[in-house]
Amino acid sequence: MDQEDLIRRLNWFYSLELNQVELYKVQSKQFKDHYAGQVFERVAAIEQSHVDNVAARITSLGAKPTLLGEVVSPILGMSLGNLMSLTGLERALQLNMELERKAMSDYKKLVQDLVAGGEDPSGDLCSQLKHNFVDEHLHTALFDTLRENLMEDKIETL
């Protein structure tokens, strides 16, 4: 993969992660009276770290993170967060899991492509992408646990 393709793919993650930050911030406010609101707030902070590390990687490659992502993704995230919240907590958690699975799938594909092409000799980029993947996996598992507990009326609060 050439550098232009890598930057394009990293910009996809940049946009996706920005979208997730805003989505979870909105959901944290919409469900502030639930434990899930606290979870969404924390997940938004983790997703912001992904935005930051992907942006830094793009910059280190001599490019700038996409302006489209900076402008459109937060708007989409806020809109989606508001719409998803209207469907109720259980459905919002389900939709969040689908979004997280998409991120995981895309992270996995990029790591595979980098490894197959021998294009990350230091392993630094793959390591960063794998860490982001792990976070997305943890978010999916957490959302699933919340959804199951909600369905069984066993959700905990702090």
Image (cartoon, grey):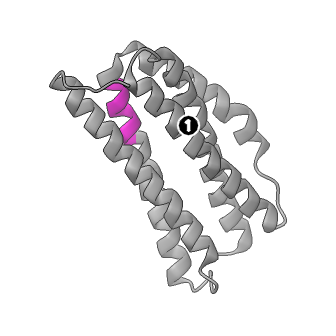
Residue at far left of view: 152
Which residue sits at x=57%, y=27%?
Answer: 25
The quadrant the N terminus occupies is bottom right
Report if residue 37 lies within the magenta region.
no
Q: Nearer the viewer, residue 35 or 24?
A: 35
Q: Is residue 96 left or right of residue 153?
A: right
User: Where's residue 156, x and y in %?
Assistant: 29, 27
User: Where's residue 55, x and y in %?
Assistant: 73, 54
Report if residue 97 lies within the magenta region.
yes
Q: Is residue 57 left or right of residue 25?
A: right
User: Where's residue 8, x and y in %?
Assistant: 68, 58
At mark 1, the secondary structure is helix
Q: Which region shows up in magenta?
A: 91-98
Which residue sits at x=65%, y=35%?
Answer: 73
- Compared to residue 36, the image places residue 54 above or below, namely below
Q: Is residue 98 left or right of residue 79?
A: left
Q: Is residue 57 left or right of residue 103?
A: right
Assess disc 1: are there few (<14), some (14-19) or many (≥20) residues with their C-alpha within 10 Å of its C-alpha. many
- Magenta stretch, main secondary structure, is helix
User: Where's residue 90, x and y in %?
Assistant: 29, 24
Which residue sits at x=59%, y=23%?
Answer: 78
Task: Name the residue beneath numbered marker 1.
Answer: 44
Number of marks in picture: 1
- Compared to residue 153, the image places residue 125 above or below, namely below
The quadrant the C terminus occupies is top left
The kind of residue tagged 1 is Ala
Q: Nearer the viewer, residue 158 or 1?
A: 158
Residue at far front of view: 158
Which residue sits at x=79%, y=42%?
Answer: 67
